[in-house]
Amino acid sequence: MNTSKVWYVTGASQGLGLTLVKKLLDKGYRVAATSRNAHALKNAVGVIDSDRFLPLAVDLGNVDCIDESVQQTLAAFGQIDVVVNNAGYGMAGTLEETEDQKIQDIINVNLLATLNVTKSILPLMRRQRSGYVFNIGSVAGFVGAPGWSVYSATKAAVAAFSEVLALDVKEFNIKVTVVEPSGFRTGFLTKDSLAYTESKIDGYKSVKDTQERYLAADGKQPGDPEKASEIIIELAESDESPLHLYLGQDAYNRASEKLKNMTAELELWKEITVAADFK
């Protein structure tokens, strides 16, 4: 295990990001971690070791702020070997009842921040001719549930971005993995983290039933963030790496079922599909 590697982790004050940062520091890695409040982040991590831990107050909606945090990391540690685009949150509700600004806000955090952080760090990794980019997506980006349309759209975009990015940077020995978990026991479904709009419109039964089931599952999710963090760290040290990494039995079940259905549908409509070409 190469503990001289430097990790840059966004959204590190809670949830998977916080668990990952703590585990990295326990293992001896050097870590730059971002949050909107560096003091709160430092308290949450509970480590006072300026030699290995750099808490950064970063507005991920501000490109200049992101660039400055990258330069601060380089000044402190001299390199960045692994970036984890973890910052993000959930949104539940019907599309027609969700405010436009809330839609723009989640796109800014879940998608644009991932693009901008990666864009800022790529030149460094390209010069090093090495690096690993982990983008935290969700199984919902591949198999959505009723009432999660906007959230699923952001995570589907993260997955598509990761797929093409991996092709773009392969020649520089930069790896890319999009991590797509199902329900993990973090604060994801708490009122402080989830942007939830209760539906007041008659109907939308599947949305309302799904929301009720999801909200009742808070604190009971089967996914273990400690195990997820261990897996990510092990992957960063491995010679082999997946492009898509689904985490959790539910994620596996949902993804595999959709793949079967997609294959069946593709074959069912093949004649019409290929009929669109010039003959």
Image (spheres, rainbow, N blue to C red):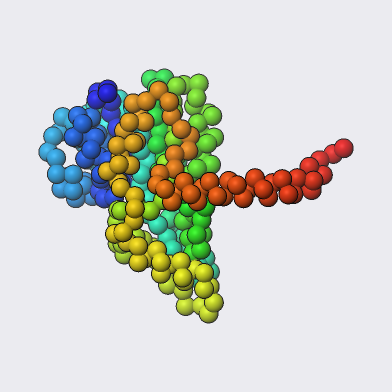
Q: Report whether residue 203 is seen.
A: yes
Q: Report whether residue 39 is seen.
A: no
Quadrant for residue 124, please give it: top left
Left or right of 101 in this view: 1? left
Q: Position of residue 37 (x, y in %)?
A: 23, 50
Q: Residue at x 36, y 31 (%)?
A: 235
Residue that extends furthest to the left in the rendered view of this protein: 48
Q: Position of residue 106 (x, y in %)?
A: 43, 55
Q: Residue at x 40, y 63 (%)?
A: 214
For the C terminus, the quadrant is top right
Residue that extends furthest to the right in the rendered view of this protein: 279
The residue nearer to you, when weighing 181 against 153, is 181
The residue nearer to you, when weighing 268 against 98, is 268
Q: Position of residue 246 (x, y in %)?
A: 44, 43
Q: How many marks?
A: 0
Q: Position of residue 66 (x, y in %)?
A: 34, 40
Quadrant for residue 126, please give it: top left
Q: Residue at x 52, y 36 (%)?
A: 163
Left or right of 188 in this view: 50? left
For the N terminus, the quadrant is top left
The residue nearer to you, when weighing 196 against 99, is 196
Q: Residue at x 32, y 28 (%)?
A: 80
